[in-house]
Image (cartoon, rainbow, N blue to C red):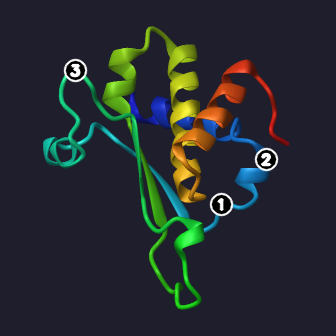
Amino acid sequence: MTREQFEKLVGEAVALIPRRFRREMKNLALVVEEEPSEDLLEEMEIEPPDTLYGLYQGTPLPERTWAYGNTLPDRITIYQRPIEEDCEDEDEMRAVIGETLIHEVGHYFGMSEEEIEEIEEKYWRGEDEG
C-alpha cells in the first residue's frame, strides 16, 4: 500500500474518534512513519515479535501548567509497516488505526490505561461517545 493510501485510511479513522474528543484536540500533529526505530523499541522495552502501532509524544493536557505555551505541537505517530504486516485487509487496517488513534489520543488527554481500554471496548462495540 502506498503512503498516500495509508494516510487516507488514517484520515478515515480520525473521523471515528468520538466527537467530544476531536473537538478538544488542539496543537496536535498526526504523522505517519514507516516503522518505529530499533532505538525507540529498545527504549520502550518492546521485543519482537511485539511492535508498536502508534506513539504519543508531548505533555498530556492535565500535566500542563499555567506557564505551558508557545510550544511545538504534541505528536501522534502512526507506524504503517507494523499495521500492514499484522492486518489482512484495508478494513482491518482501518480498525487497527482507529483503535491506535483512540489509544494515543487518550494519552494526550491524560487518561489512564483503564480509561483508554474502556473507550476502546466501546469503539469495538460500535458505541458512539458523542
Q: Along the horizontal axis of the image, is 88 left or right of 66?
A: left
Residue 1 visible in the current orientation:
no
- Looking at the figure, which quarter contains the C terminus? top right
Q: Which residue is mark 2?
A: 19
Judge by depth and name the residue closer to the eye, 65 or 2. Answer: 65
Residue 115 drawn above or below residue 5: below
Q: Along the horizontal axis of the image, is 67 left or right of 87?
A: right
Classify mark 2: residues with Cα within 10 Å, few (<14), some (14-19) or many (20+): few
Q: CA distance from mark 1 to mark 3?
A: 32 Å
Mark before the other along the chain sequence, 2 or 1? 2
Q: CA distance from mark 2 to mark 1?
A: 10 Å
Percent coordinates x, y for residue 49 in the rendering: 22, 20
Badge 3 marks a residue whose secondary structure is loop
Mark before the other along the chain sequence, 1 or 3? 1
Q: Along the horizontal axis of the image, is 26 left or right of 24?
A: left
Which residue reaches farthest bottom? 67
Mark number, residue 49: 3
Percent coordinates x, y for residue 68 in the rendering: 52, 85
Which residue reaches farthest top? 88
Mark number, residue 25: 1
Contact? badges 2 and 1 (CB < 8 Å)? no
Q: Residue at x 79, y 47 (%)?
A: 19
Q: Residue at x 26, y 41 (%)?
A: 36
Classify mark 1: residues with Cα within 10 Å, few (<14), some (14-19) or many (20+): few
Residue 27 drawn above or below residue 51: below
Contact? badges 1 and 3 (CB < 8 Å)? no
Identify which amino acid the numbered label 2 is placed on. Answer: Arg
Percent coordinates x, y for residue 57 in the rendering: 40, 59
Give the quarter of the image for residue 32: top left
